[in-house]
Image (cartoon, rainbow, N blue to C red):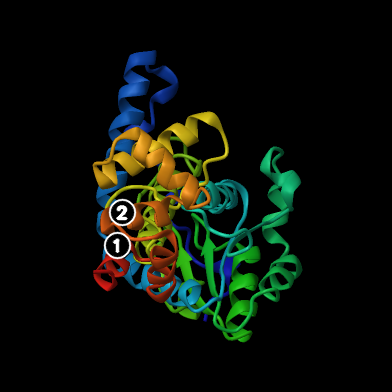
């Protein structure tokens, strides 16, 4: 097999003939060009939904079985992964440490470029060594070549984890060593090699869809409502009451009382209001159904 650093360049590194004259364009022309290129990204993501569905099912299996999901990335890819992991806690009430993002260069690389860190295979292998059997390891790299990600996925696989690669390079040399490769082909960037643009947008869309679908499959919503959201400020507490009202049709006073009785747990309040059940009965039903509201309601008279 050809070594990673000798593999052909991905299309993300090639020149885009449509943007060859950008340094002579007016501001509106330049913005229209960037926007036209950006519009290609959702279609590229749509083309890899079958692979993404497999990745979601792997994540559901891992998290549903008490294991973890790990993201590994460098540069823009790693920062997008950190953002995705961090937002799952307040949005879906996911326990800290269940989805873990490993960024090449560490926390300092979030705000200051640390491009050399992406070549640090020993750091990648060390991060991948934190994975346990049954976990899911997701490598995120636009080029599909990043040594840090390659080493992390290899170490994670050796530890008994399932592996997913998210890249913008269908011909990634890393892909042969993973279980699933999600590779929207976003093509050459407006600025050659600047994968913070289309490739980065694709990775944001892929990880948004991946994590959201995983949380929904795990019962972290009721319908399209964020019943597991952490209400930690005034705005979110108001939103929580609106969610209860939307879900149950109850007036604000009843919702507030049900939420208080449920100890602030909106999902318990939803089940108790809809089923007319006690907090204790609602809690038992949710426990028996792993937190799925529809299933819990079917257990109650």
Residue 20: x and y in percent read 39, 31
Q: Cβ–Cβ below 8 Å for labels 1 and 2? A: yes
Q: Position of residue 160 (x, y in %)?
A: 58, 86
The answer to whether residue 13 is visible is no
Name the disc covering residue 48, or none.
Answer: 1
Q: Which residue is mark 2?
A: 45
Residue in the image at 35% along x and 60% along y: 216
173 lies left or right of 251: right
Q: Quadrant of residue 209?
A: bottom left
Image quarter of residue 32: top left
Q: Would residue 239 appear left or right of 224 to someone viewing this image?
A: right
Q: Secondary structure at mark 1?
A: loop
| Alpha carbons under labels 1 and 2: distance apart | 6 Å
Q: Residues within 10 Å of mark 1 (few under 14, many from 20)?
A: some
Q: Residue at x 37, y 22 (%)?
A: 30
The total of numbered circles placed on residues is 2
Residue 293: percent from the left, percent from the top? 33, 62
Q: Is residue 85 above or below residue 99?
A: above
């Amino acid at each position: 097999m050809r070594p990673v650093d000798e593999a052909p360049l991905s299309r993300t590194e090639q020149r885009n003939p449509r943007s060859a004259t950008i340094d002579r364009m007016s501001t509106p022309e330049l913005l229209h060009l960037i926007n036209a290129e950006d519009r290609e990204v959702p279609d590229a993501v749509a083309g890899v939904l079958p692979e993404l569905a497999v990745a979601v099912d792997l994540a559901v299996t891992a998290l549903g079985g008490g294991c973890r999901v790990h993201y590994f990335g460098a540069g823009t890819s790693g920062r997008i992964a950190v953002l995705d992991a961090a937002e799952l806690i307040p949005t879906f009430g996911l326990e800290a440490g269940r989805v873990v993002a490993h960024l090449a260069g560490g926390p300092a690389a979030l705000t200051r470029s640390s491009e050399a860190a992406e070549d640090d295979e020993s750091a990648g292998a060390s991060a991948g060594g934190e994975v346990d059997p049954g976990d899911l390891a997701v490598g995120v790299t636009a080029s599909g070549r990043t040594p840090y990600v390659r080493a992390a996925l290899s170490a994670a696989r050796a530890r008994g984890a399932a592996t997913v690669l998210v890249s913008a390079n269908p011909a990634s040399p890393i892909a042969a060593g993973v279980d699933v490769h999600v590779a929207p082909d976003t093509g050459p960037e407006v600025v050659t090699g600047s994968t913070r643009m289309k490739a980065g947008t694709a990775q944001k869309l892929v990880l948004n869809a991946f994590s959201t679908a995983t949380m929904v499959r795990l019962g972290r919503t009721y319908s399209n409502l964020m019943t597991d959201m952490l209400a930690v400020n005034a705005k979110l507490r108001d939103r929580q009451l609106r969610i209860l009202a939307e879900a149950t049709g109850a007036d604000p006073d009843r919702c507030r009382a049900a939420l208080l009785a449920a100890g602030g747990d909106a999902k318990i309040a939803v089940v108790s209001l809809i089923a007319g059940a006690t907090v204790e009965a609602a809690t038992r039903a949710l426990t028996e159904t792993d937190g799925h509201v529809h299933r819990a309601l079917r257990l109650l008279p």
